[in-house]
């Protein structure tokens, strides 16, 4: 019989029992559930709501149950609707009356909210760790290939040359913001609902501050209705996961393009590629494609919970049971994607010659030639027009700007002198972009430094957060 069977004449139909159960999903929260119950029992004992002896028996038996679960010696029974019932029934089987006292002044509504918040904090921390490892791999790749030049694109057309390290650092910054979003999700989860009971608080003299402190929560949620029905923290986690998964999908797209024979900018290592069952020559960037594809699932998980929450009246409704599956899935998917991307980045081969060859096509020096004229007094709009004519000339002749003679240049403007060739050298063009945040070598060195410091700072933040997760 279920733990709530008192007012019922019949048990639940076998199908509805299965349909209504969340155990297959929420058993992943066993550690958080047991930690929450231990904290509650200790507080009940300290407040003399139950005897100290019962409180100790409960905590000891819960520790045994935890180790049985971890050793695979615990059989989950689907007749226990969820992890809370599974643990409590087993507790009562083991220690009888004392176990049956654990749920005093508590409801599964504040219990599940507590477990889920602890779980969200733990997963946010795991994701921050994986995020940092990936950033470190990207930073190492950027430093190793610091000087390599590739075409920078707008509209997928060659635009201006940029340093490969600058390109990689753009992703490091995206991931740095993702870390901040994960931290915000951690903070959103970091308040204790325990003691809100079913929805209205209880008549027992609970010490909510004590259980919050024991569980490592930074604060206590001030409204019992909100405490049991708020799932913003999961939406925040799902949003953080979604944005980061989208960032990874952008990087994947570039890795996939770069590894085509048309680009040939990189070769992914064999350990991060697959072959074809029919075409012997194939080497496919499957894992980059898979990460790109999985981003859709992560965003789907966010959408699903947003829709579940829409129009939900206060306070707890069973709809809320749908909250965990997507959050667990999104966190796992992103964590795996981070790990896979890290492996791919640290093992891929870079082909600087192929990048440089492409950078020398498509008149990437055109802006700098226009700047050359503008710096000699011609208004930039007119300079743009002059260089436009030169590019047209190149297109007609099927050549590049640096194939033109000084005479060709001077036919368009008398301001041109022999030193214009300097505006056509890719390394010089790149180096000249000295603006803070630009692709100039000096500026990228500053950036590399800043991105590395941000990583170190985030490592420190993470070490602090790790101290208070269950
Ligand atoms: N399994 C439930 C969930 O995940 C636990 C809370 C159930 N509470 C209730 N009153 N039915 O949301």
Image (cartoon, rainbow, N blue to C red):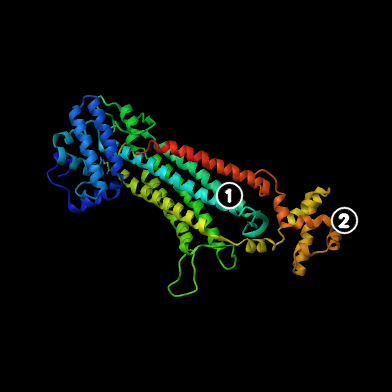
Residue 328 appears anywhere in the view: yes
Spot occupied by residue 421 in the image (x, y as percentages of width and height): 79, 58
Spot occupied by residue 396 in the image (x, y as percentages of width and height): 76, 68
Res 205 → quadrant: top left
Q: Secondary structure at mark 2?
A: loop
- Name the outermost residue toward the front: 144
Spot occupied by residue 159 in the image (x, y as percentages of width and height): 67, 57
- Name the outermost residue toward the right: 414
Spot occupied by residue 10 in the image (x, y as percentages of width and height): 13, 46
First in sequence: mark 1 or mark 2?
Answer: 1
Q: Is residue 104 left or right of residue 315?
A: left
Q: Is residue 91 above or below residue 251?
A: above
Q: Is residue 30 above or below residue 274?
A: above
Name the quadrant where ligand 1 sits.
Answer: top left
Residue marked by disc 1: 170
Q: Secondary structure at mark 1?
A: helix
Residue marked by disc 2: 414
At horizontal 49% and vertical 68% (from top left) the residue drawn is: 283
Residue 50 appears anywhere in the view: no
Q: Is residue 407 above or below residue 434?
A: below
- Name the outermost residue toward the left: 9
The quarter of the image holding the N terminus is top left
Rate crowding at label 1 as few (under 14), some (14 to 19) or many (20 or more) other CA atoms within 10 Å: some
Q: Nearer the viewer, residue 422 or 300?
A: 422
Distance CA(mark 1)–CA(mark 2): 40 Å
Residue 433, label in figure: none
């Amino acid at each position: 019989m279920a733990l709530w069977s008192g007012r019922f004449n019949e048990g639940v139909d076998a199908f509805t029992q299965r349909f209504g159960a969340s155990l297959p999903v929420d058993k992943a929260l066993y550690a958080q559930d047991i930690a929450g119950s231990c904290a509650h029992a200790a507080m009940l004992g300290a407040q003399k709501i139950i005897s100290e002896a019962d409180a100790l028996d409960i905590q000891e038996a819960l520790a045994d149950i935890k180790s049985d679960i971890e050793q695979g010696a615990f059989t989950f029974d689907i007749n226990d609707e969820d992890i809370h019932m599974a643990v409590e029934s087993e507790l009562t089987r083991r220690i009888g009356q004392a176990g049956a006292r654990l749920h005093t002044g508590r409801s599964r509504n504040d219990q599940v909210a507590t477990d889920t918040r602890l779980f969200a904090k733990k997963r946010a921390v795991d994701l921050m760790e994986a995020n940092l490892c990936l950033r470190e791999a990207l930073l190492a790749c950027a430093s190793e290939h610091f000087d390599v030049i590739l075409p920078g694109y707008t509209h997928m057309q060659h635009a201006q040359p940029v340093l490969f390290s600058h390109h990689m650092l753009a992703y490091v910054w995206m991931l740095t913001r993702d870390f901040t979003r994960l931290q915000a999700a951690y903070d959103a989860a970091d308040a204790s609902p325990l003691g809100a009971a079913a929805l209205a608080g209880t008549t027992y003299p609970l010490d909510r501050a004590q259980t919050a402190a024991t569980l490592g929560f930074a604060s206590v949620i001030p409204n019992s209705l909100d405490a049991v029905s708020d799932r913003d923290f999961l939406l925040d986690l799902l949003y953080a996961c979604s944005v980061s998964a989208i960032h990874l999908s952008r990087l994947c797209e570039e890795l996939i393009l770069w590894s085509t024979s048309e680009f040939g900018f990189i070769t992914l290592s064999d350990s991060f590629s697959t072959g074809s069952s029919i075409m012997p020559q194939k080497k496919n960037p499957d894992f980059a494609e898979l990460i790109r594809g999985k981003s859709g699932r992560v965003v789907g998980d966010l959408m699903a919970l947003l829709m579940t929450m829409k129009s939900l009246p206060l306070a707890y409704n069973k709809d809320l049971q749908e909250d965990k599956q997507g959050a667990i899935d999104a966190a796992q998917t992103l964590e795996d994607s981070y790990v896979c991307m890290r492996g791919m980045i640290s093992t891929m081969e870079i082909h600087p010659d192929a990048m440089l060859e492409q950078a020398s096509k498509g008149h990437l020096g055109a802006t700098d030639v226009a700047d050359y004229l503008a710096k000699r007094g011609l208004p930039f709009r007119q300079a743009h027009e002059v260089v436009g004519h030169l590019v047209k000339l190149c297109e007609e002749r099927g050549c590049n700007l640096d194939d033109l003679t000084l005479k060709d240049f001077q036919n368009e403007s008398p301001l041109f002198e022999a030193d214009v060739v300097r505006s056509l050298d890719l390394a010089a063009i790149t180096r000249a972009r000295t603006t803070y945040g630009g692709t100039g070598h000096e500026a990228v060195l500053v950036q590399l430094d800043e991105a590395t410091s941000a990583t170190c700072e985030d490592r420190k933040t993470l070490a602090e957060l790790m101290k208070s997760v269950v």
